[in-house]
Amino acid sequence: MTSNATIRATGGRPLLITDCDEVLLHMVTPFGAWLDEAHAIDFAMERPDFSGALTRRADSSPVEEEHIGPLLDAFFTTEMHRQTLVPHAARALATIAELADIVVLTNLTDQFHAGRVAQLEAVGIRHRVQCNQGGKGQPVADLVAEYRPSATVFVDDLPHHHASVARHAPEVWRLHMIAEPRLARHRAPAADAHARIDDWAEALPWIVARFA
């Protein structure tokens, strides 16, 4: 298998651009377990976002928004090994790779790139990994310009990324996926996605049909 550093666009093939956390790898459950064990912080998954979802067990006070980023950085620095593969994800990507190029577009800073590549390779996912901060619309548009694919599918768990892609690359098919059931049941389908499918076994034929 070609190393991540030497993977290049082949041009003309379809393109899958997929998020990682809660799409390929579970993140909120191991993050919540670590918050519980290391920081005595409770994580309420039913809340719409991290803001207000984290509370200190000692006094039930909410964790201030400015402290959430450092907690996430600390998790990705030392706890990536806790993340587990989403069911059916590796098999679906192996099938897709036979007919399309694949890029993992993950919202982590570049310092975590090597760790993300390594943890994906450890579960059999060996594709180009690109780190990003902020909305994913422009990076997706840039990837489409680079690969010039016959069709592109974008998969992500966060609605604001679908809105960003709809704005910057409206020709891209957008699939909303939340792989953690305890999170998914509290999240409505993204308004700017073409479909909501939370299981890779069901998503695979939908993606392949878009490529066709």
Image: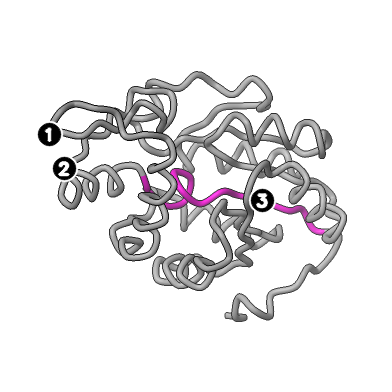
Q: Closer to us: mark 3 or mark 2?
A: 2
Q: CA distance from mark 1 to mark 2?
A: 7 Å
Amino acid marked by disc 3: Ile
Where the C terminus falls, by quadrant?
Answer: top right
Q: Badge 2: how crowded within 10 Å, few (<14), some, or many (20+)?
A: some
Task: Check disc 2 and report the residue beneath it.
Answer: 40
Amino acid marked by disc 2: Ala
Q: Which numbered dot is residue 17?
A: 3
Do callouts 1 and 2 mark residues in contact (Cβ within 8 Å)?
A: yes
Q: Which residues are magenta?
A: 13-27
Q: Nearer the viewer, residue 92 or 185?
A: 185
Q: Which numbered dot is residue 58?
A: 1
Task: Determine if the magenta segment contains residue 87.
Answer: no
Q: Kindly state the secondary structure of the residue where label 1 is placed.
A: loop
Q: CA distance from mark 3 to mark 2?
A: 36 Å
Q: Nearer the viewer, residue 39 or 118?
A: 39
